[in-house]
Structure formats: structure tokens, C-alpha cells
Image (spheres, helix red, strand yellow):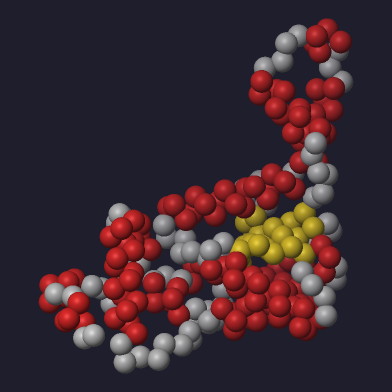
Amino acid sequence: LKPSQWLSVQELQAIPAVDELTLERLENMSLEKGAELLQQVYHLSQINHDVEPNFVPSNIQVYVPKPNGDKIVAPISEMIQRLKQKQNFGQDEVTIIVTGLPQTSETVKKATRKLVQAYMQRYNLQQQQQQAQKYNSESEEDNKRQRTSSEEDYSEQAKNANTNTGDIIVIDLGSTLTNYKRYAMLDIEKTGAKIGKWIVELTSELQLPHETIHMIGQNVGAHVAGAAANEFTRLTGHKL
């Protein structure tokens, strides 16, 4: 069918170009309207086009959050040298998070922040255990008093805590996906292969055991993380 056979002239004129369609615009629409617009854009983009993913970000920003709230920020090509200067980096676990949505949206920023904070809290549980010991060393008289529910929850969490510590690396792929066209045209395999090669270099330069490296991804970043892990395995024979 020609577009004019299933869309009115007014509807065709109202449809944005693929590179003008942003996450913020979709976020401000109802679910039904957003889905309808995406469907229209997708089908129009297929007309007389053999669409092949061709977007591969050139130099993704990477950051390493610190417990005090600061970050080490650098392009991926420079981050390994920066990490060499960080004392005790990678001494235990290293979790690599690949973002997959533009960070221009407050909703996405909040989701990413919560994800990073969850891993920061996980790695700070050893400190929580030490604080829990303070509760256990209280005088017998203090122990007899009725604890609040928050104290009980805190002590239980600390008692069951995993004492592993570690570092987090955030590969901010999402910030390169500034519009829907880039998101839709992202070459997952090639982008993942670039990140996989970088992880090989990271483990080699910093002498990190591959067993301590963990990868997770957000949205399309999960697919890229999978491709990166496959490339790492292809190059080293080891799985992440």
C-alpha cells in the first residue's frame, strides 16, 4: 500500500522524521499514541529502503562512581589509563553496566541512578556489617529495649550481607543515542565487539581476573553487553 492509502495527508504531514523523534517526545505521549506513532514511523521507513543497522558510537563516555558521590569520567579510549592511577581498583569484583537509553530524560536518569546505587550499596555491605557489630556490642540494658522496625530491618540486612566489595564501571552508551534514528539503527554486534575488545584490554592492562568481571545492560544495552561478552570469549576463550 502507498502511505496515502492508509494515512491521511494531515497524518502524513504530522509524522516526524526518524531523526527528529526523541525519547522525551514519546515519554510525553500516552502509551497508545506513542505506540501508534512508532508503528507509523517504522512502516514509513521501510518503504523503498533496505534498512541495515549502521550506527556505531565512536568514543563512548565512561564513568566510575565513587562512594562519596564523585565520579571518574573519561572517554572509553582514555579510561584504562585513568583507572591505572586509581589505587586498588579491581581488587575484588568489577561490575560493568552498559546503559541503553538517552540520559536526557529525567525518568531514564532516575532509573540509571537507582541501578548504580543498588550496586554501590551491594559493595558497601561489608561496611554495613561493621556498623551492625556496633549494635551487637551495645550494653545488655540497651539490647533489652524494644528496637524500632527500621533498626531490626537494618540489623537483618547487615547480618545477611555478602561481604564482597567491588568497583563499578558505567559505559554510557545511552548518551550516544540522542534520537530514535540512532537508537533504531544501532549496530549491536559491532558496538558490542568494540566494547568486548576494550574489556580484553582492561583485564590485560590492569591484570584483572576474568572471573571477577560481571556485565549487565539496560534496555538495548543488555543486547550490546551480550555481544561484548561474546567478543571477549572469542578473543580470550573465557566467559564473562
The answer to whether 143 appears left or right of 219 in the picture is right
**What residue lies at 81% left-to-right and 44% top-to-bottom?**
162
Across the whole image, how many numbered discs are drawn on residues?
A: 0
Instruction: Look at the image and tell me whether residue 33 can be seen.
Output: yes
The answer to whether 224 appears left or right of 208 in the picture is left
Q: Is residue 5 above or below residue 159?
A: below
Residue 15: x and y, percent?
A: 23, 73
174 vs 202, nearest the viewer: 174
Query: Where is residue 60, by image quadrant?
Result: bottom right
31 vs 209, nearest the viewer: 31
Query: Where is residue 50, by image quadrant?
Result: bottom left
**What residue lies at 17% left-to-right and 81% top-to-bottom?**
5
101 vs 168, nearest the viewer: 101
Query: Where is residue 62, by image quadrant?
Result: bottom right
Instruction: Look at the image and tell me whether residue 89 can be seen.
Output: no
User: In which quadrant will I find the C terminus?
Assistant: bottom right
Residue 205: x and y, percent?
A: 80, 75
The answer to whether 66 appears left or right of 37 in the picture is right
Q: Is residue 115 above or below residue 53?
A: above
Q: Is residue 122 above or below residue 189?
A: above
Residue 142: x and y, percent?
A: 80, 11
Residue 147: x and y, percent?
A: 72, 15
**What residue lies at 75% left-to-right and 48% top-to-bottom?**
123
User: In which quadrant will I find the N terminus?
Assistant: bottom left
**What residue lies at 82% left-to-right and 75% top-to-bottom?**
238
